Amino acid sequence: MGAELPTIKVSVELTGILRCHNIATDKQPQAMLPSNKSWEHQHGLEWTEWHLTPSGWEQGDEKTDFNKTSRPIPAGRVQTVTYHEEVSSGFSPLEKFKTVDWTSADTELLKALIHRFGEAPEHL
């Protein structure tokens, strides 16, 4: 079988940051990305939402450094993807990753638009 998963202790701080503590290795808690972006990350998380529409990928809300810009969700979107860049400390490398935040039930249209416009942009 596969490797045994570690035992994790989860807690939520008053700031809304979810922390996990690996009991087996006694590693310090690490912040995890909550499902909403209404909080300000303490270590340098920047992100940009991208909405796939029949016109292509349109930029949505974004957060860079200490600035957050909100934009309306475009009509006709079929998918929303958020591109993230994070430096968790001054000694950590830049981490880049994407999350799919919302997808339309119209899978045929989604496939056609991704074929036409490609995957979500990978930049802020």
Image (tube, grey):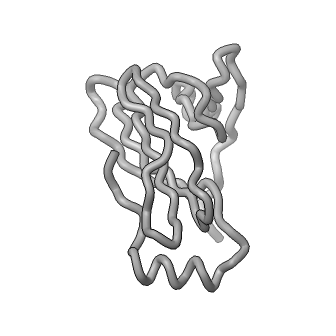
Q: Kindly identify the residue that appears in the image at 70 percent across and 14 percent down.
A: 14
Q: Inspect this view and state whether residue 88 appears.
A: no
Tell me where residue 123 appears, x and y as whole percent. Answer: 32, 51
Q: Kindly identify the residue that appears in the image at 59 percent across and 50 percent down.
A: 73
Q: Relative to 19, does residue 3 appear above or below in the rendering? A: below
Q: Nearer the viewer, residue 1 or 18?
A: 18
Tell me where residue 95 appears, x and y as whole percent. Answer: 35, 44
- Relative horizontal placement of residue 73, taking residue 95 as reference (left or right): right
Q: Inspect this view and state whether residue 18 appears.
A: yes
- Relative horizontal placement of residue 27, taking residue 16 as reference (left or right): left
How many labels were placed on the picture?
A: 0
Q: Quadrant of the C terminus?
A: top left
Tell me where residue 45 appears, x and y as whole percent. Answer: 42, 32
Q: Nearer the viewer, residue 103 or 52?
A: 52
Q: Relative to 64, does residue 14 appear above or below in the rendering? A: above
Res 110 → quadrant = bottom right
Q: Quadrant of the N terminus?
A: bottom right
Q: Kindly identify the residue that appears in the image at 59 percent across and 63 percent down.
A: 77
Q: Nearer the viewer, residue 24 or 34?
A: 34
- Relative horizontal placement of residue 102, taking residue 124 as reference (left or right): right
Res 9 → quadrant = top right
Q: Relative to 92, does residue 50 appear above or below in the rendering? A: below
